[in-house]
């Protein structure tokens, strides 16, 4: 088996973009589009059922109209009507036979076909955990891209082709998901959005009392006692007998009275500080790098000085006089200076992309990350991409792409990772050393989001179909270059296909000689 291999990763947006979901969540675009077709099939089945019911009612209606005319005539002169032998016979026949047939028609269940289809399709439906995962994904996108609830609710997202709105029930559901996770910051945001839409006159099965019940408690949990008391009183105006609200009102008034009796100076300072800290809405899984990461995802990274920008160039690259690129050199663009990140333009064709995607789709599986606590590879809520491994011997297109990478980078691809390992010391088993460099193909355009960011240096690299970016993960000395630590931003609108090739140290001894300086 050849050791030339490319790893093709499908990263999907919501929703559905990148989601905070459990391992079984519908993360691939293929699965999501399958659900669209499933729902379309169910709608067709439902319309067939409605048509059958309408046909049935039409038959009953015609029967009723015919009998109405007949009985109207008969009741005007009952004796004269039944005096006609034919009328007498037909009356006996109707009451003995035809009314029984009508009864059978009325009792006939026209829903069998629809219910049978629904039962079959239900096995492919997402479950409660999937729905919660999709809600969490939306909350994460809200934070990452600094979106307010009204923007999301009205569907005013950048690059959208199919605008969609959130109802009061949708906003209420998002608030409840946050509440269940003790995320009172997002609970407040989404319950307030639900309340606004109700105040604007939106008709909903969700009432203001239910919204205010969650909202008042979420506000209290964040330390804003005055607002919690005000919302509770508003709730009781709508429902004076609400048991929990009456209890909360007494409790809030007790706490406020207690605070008034306490030392004002010390109490107020501490209270203000606590409220400020809680109102920041810091997530439970907050990391120090998160703020920088989210800024980079929004394109708010470090701006290069004009002096640094002047050192970035576009050029034609012939792979160090490689015969394949002398007459048709590759187009290079400097994306960043330190670390040096290079983008190759028009480096993979649409036809090649489609072949690679077709090869990868049947074997996509959930990508894993290294768990520092257990030392094992596991799925993670923040990474819901799916990946597949493709080797050069499977298809000449994959082999050709492999050689293109080798020709342009000057690095040996024969020591690339051969199989997707399920153990943390996979590199040790390969015996090919660390990943010396990364080559990343962008195989789709993304409507919004989906950047590759480098938090250490403040760089953001945006997807562009048909291009590839390349950088070294190690210095020439073999020491790790921590400035190349990178992360993928969640897709806000659209979906993202990428493929990457990890090149290893072994085999590069004469292609990229080791230096004496540690950081060179």
Image: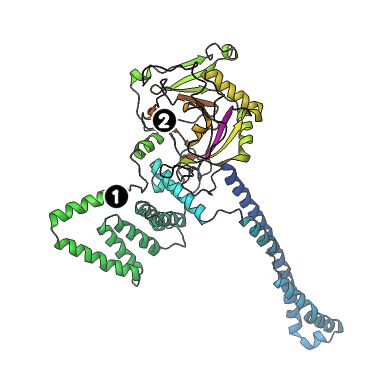
What is the crowding at mark 2: few (fewer than 14 residues within 10 Å), some, or many (at least 20)? many
| Residue pointed to by mark 2 | 460
Residue nearer the viewer, 436 or 388: 436
Quick check: 303 above or below 136? above
Residue at the far right: name it: 85
Query: Does dot 1 land on a helix, a strand or a loop?
Result: loop
Q: According to the image, what is the colour scheme of the structure?
A: rainbow
Name the residue located 23 percent from the left edge and 65 percent from the top edge.
253
> Where does label 1 land, which residue?
279
Q: Position of residue 7 (x, y in %)?
A: 55, 32
**Figure check: 520 above or below 65:** above
Give the residues in magenta: 4-12
Mark 2 and mark 1 lie on one chain; the one further toward the N terminus is 1
Q: Is residue 292 magenta?
A: no
Closer-to-camera residue (314/283): 283
Q: Is residue 454 above or below residue 192?
A: above
Q: SS for tag 2?
A: strand
The residue drawn where x is 53% and y is 18% is 408
- How many C-alpha atoms fall within 10 Å of the one at disc 1: few (<14), some, or many (≥20)? some
Residue 218 placed where, x, y %?
33, 57
């Amino acid at each position: 088996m050849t050791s030339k291999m490319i790893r093709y990763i499908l990263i999907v947006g919501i929703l559905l973009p990148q989601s905070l979901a459990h391992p079984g969540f519908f993360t691939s675009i293929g699965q999501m589009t399958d659900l669209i077709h499933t729902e379309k099939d169910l709608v067709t089945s439902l319309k067939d059922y409605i048509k059958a019911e309408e046909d049935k009612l039409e038959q009953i209606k015609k029967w009723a109209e015919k009998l109405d005319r007949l009985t109207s005539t008969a009741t005007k002169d009952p004796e004269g009507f039944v005096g006609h032998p034919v009328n007498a016979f037909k009356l006996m026949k109707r009451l003995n036979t035809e009314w029984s047939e009508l009864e059978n028609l009325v009792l006939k269940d026209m829903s069998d076909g629809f219910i049978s289809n629904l039962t079959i399709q239900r096995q492919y439906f997402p479950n409660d955990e999937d729905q919660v995962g999709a809600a969490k994904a939306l909350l994460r996108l809200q934070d990452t891209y600094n979106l307010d609830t009204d923007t999301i609710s009205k569907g005013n997202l950048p690059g959208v082709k199919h605008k969609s709105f959130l109802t009061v029930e949708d906003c209420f559901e998002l608030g409840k998901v946050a509440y269940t996770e003790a995320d009172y910051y997002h609970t407040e945001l989404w319950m307030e959005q639900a309340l606004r839409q109700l105040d604007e006159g939106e008709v909903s099965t969700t009432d203001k009392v239910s919204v205010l019940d969650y909202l008042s408690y979420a506000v209290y949990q964040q330390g804003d006692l005055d607002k919690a008391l005000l919302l509770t009183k508003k709730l009781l105006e709508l429902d004076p007998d609400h048991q929990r609200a009456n209890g909360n009102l007494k409790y809030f008034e007790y706490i406020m009275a207690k605070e008034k009796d306490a030392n004002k100076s010390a109490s107020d300072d501490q209270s203000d500080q606590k409220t400020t800290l809680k109102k920041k809405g810091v997530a439970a899984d907050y990391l120090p790098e998160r703020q920088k990461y989210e800024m980079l995802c929004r394109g708010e990274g470090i701006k290069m000085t004009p002096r640094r920008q002047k050192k970035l160039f576009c050029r034609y690259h012939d792979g160090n006089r490689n015969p394949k690129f002398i007459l048709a050199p590759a187009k290079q663009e400097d994306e960043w200076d330190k670390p040096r990140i290079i983008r190759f333009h028009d480096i993979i064709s649409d036809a090649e992309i489609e072949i690679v995607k077709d090869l990868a789709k049947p074997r996509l599986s959930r990508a894993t990350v290294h768990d520092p606590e257990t030392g094992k590879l596991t799925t993670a809520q923040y990474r819901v991409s799916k990946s597949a491994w493709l080797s050069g011997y499977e298809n000449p297109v994959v082999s050709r792409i492999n050689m293109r990478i080798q020709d342009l980078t000057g690095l040996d691809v024969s020591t690339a990772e051969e199989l997707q390992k399920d153990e943390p010391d996979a590199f040790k088993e390969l015996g090919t050393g660390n990943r010396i460099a990364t080559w990343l193909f962008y195989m789709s355009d993304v409507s919004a989001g989906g950047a590759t960011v480098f938090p250490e240096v403040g760089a953001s690299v945006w997807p562009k179909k048909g291009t590839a970016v390349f950088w070294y993960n190690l210095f020439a000395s073999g020491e790790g270059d921590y400035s190349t630590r990178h992360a993928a931003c969640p897709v806000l609108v659209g979906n993202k296909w990428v493929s990457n090739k990890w090149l290893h140290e072994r085999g590069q001894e004469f292609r990229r000689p080791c230096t004496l300086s540690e950081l060179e």
